[in-house]
């Protein structure tokens, strides 16, 4: 982890002032509850920081069509 953090191209993503409205929209639009709230939080962070594509094998992110996802484990 320390090696990653020392890289000049690494940027840690954190909640900004507009996090709650974005997260709220994803929770309502994706009908999210329970443990999937964490997925919505990740999606909101990605959208707020301009992440163009999230690589994940977790199909739950399909609840958030505004976030482009790719599964790096499939061809």
Image (spheres, rainbow, N blue to C red):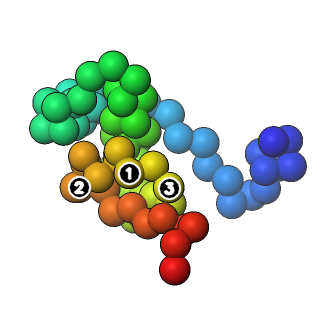
List the residue tagged with mark 3: 57
The kind of secondary structure element at disc 2 is: loop
List the residue tagged with mark 2: 66
Depth check: 52 or 30 in front? 30
The kind of secondary structure element at disc 1 is: helix
Dot 3 alpha-carbon crowd within 10 angstroms: few under 14, some 14 to 19, many 20 or more: few
Position of the N terminus by quadrant: top right
- Provide residue 19's location: percent of width, then percent of height: 32, 31
- Provide residue 51's location: percent of width, then percent of height: 42, 58
- Provide residue 33's location: percent of width, then percent of height: 27, 22
Q: CA distance from mark 3 to mark 2?
A: 17 Å
Report the residue that reaches farthest toward the left: 29
Instruction: In the rendered view, tell whether residue 53 sits above or below residue 2.
Output: below
Dot 2 alpha-carbon crowd within 10 angstroms: few under 14, some 14 to 19, many 20 or more: few
Instruction: In the rendered view, tell whether residue 13 sits above or below residue 11.
Output: above
Query: Is mark 1 in CB contact (under 8 Å) with mark 3?
Result: yes
Residue, x 85% and y 41% (percent of image)?
Answer: 2
Answer yes or no: is residue 43 visible. yes
Q: CA distance from mark 1 to mark 3?
A: 6 Å
**Horizontal side of residue 9 vs 49, given as left or right:** right
The kind of secondary structure element at disc 3 is: loop
């Amino acid at each position: 982890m320390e090696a990653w953090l020392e890289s000049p191209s690494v940027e840690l993503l954190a909640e900004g002032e507009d996090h709650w409205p974005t997260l709220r929209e994803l929770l309502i639009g994706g009908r999210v509850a329970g443990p999937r709230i964490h997925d919505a939080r990740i999606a909101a962070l990605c959208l707020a920081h301009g992440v163009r594509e999230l690589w994940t094998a977790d199909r739950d992110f399909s609840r958030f069509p505004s976030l482009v996802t790719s599964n790096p484990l499939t061809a």
